[in-house]
Image (cartoon, grey):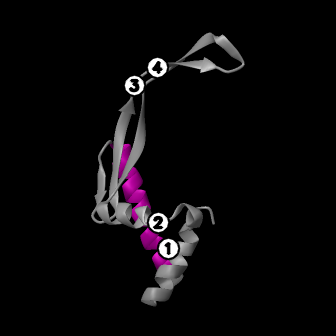
Amino acid sequence: MTKRDLVVLISEETGMVQQQVLDVVQKTLDHVCDALADGRNVELRNFGVFEVKVRKARIGRNPNQPETDVPIPRRAVVKFKPGKEMREAVLKLSPQSSKA
């Protein structure tokens, strides 16, 4: 599902103009990104939590030159932890239906 698909779906369900829905969806995503960029967590009830975690520094390997160590610095990454309802809905998927 793309952002466009989401906008069309919401527009059809609510009767709102697609441009208005797009503006609301985009503003929502902008505010989520801004909060994460400030290092804050974003909790959306019944959906999940976006968290900023810091990965520790580590040593990597170059596959073309395995004898060479490549230092990978510590960095911040975004992790998503799904809410209970989403987790339960996804668990109901059978392996055959997820391939489609």
Marks 4/3 in contact by CB < 8 Å: the verdict is yes
Q: Residue at x 48, y 65 (%)?
A: 93
- State the residue position of label 2: 26
* SS class, disc 3: loop
* SS class, disc 4: strand
**Lower position in the chain sequence, tag 3 or tag 1:** 1
Q: Which residues are magenta?
A: 19-38
Q: Is 34 colored magenta in this rendering?
A: yes
- State the residue position of label 1: 22
Residue type at tag 3: Lys
Category of crowding for the residue at label 4, using alpha-carbon neighbours closer than 10 angstroms: few (below 14), some (14–19), many (at least 20): few
Q: Quadrant of the C terminus?
A: bottom right
- State the residue position of label 4: 58
Residue type at tag 1: Leu
- State the residue position of label 3: 56
Count of labels in the image: 4
Category of crowding for the residue at label 3, using alpha-carbon neighbours closer than 10 angstroms: few (below 14), some (14–19), many (at least 20): few
Q: Is 65 colored magenta in this rendering?
A: no
Residue type at tag 4: Arg
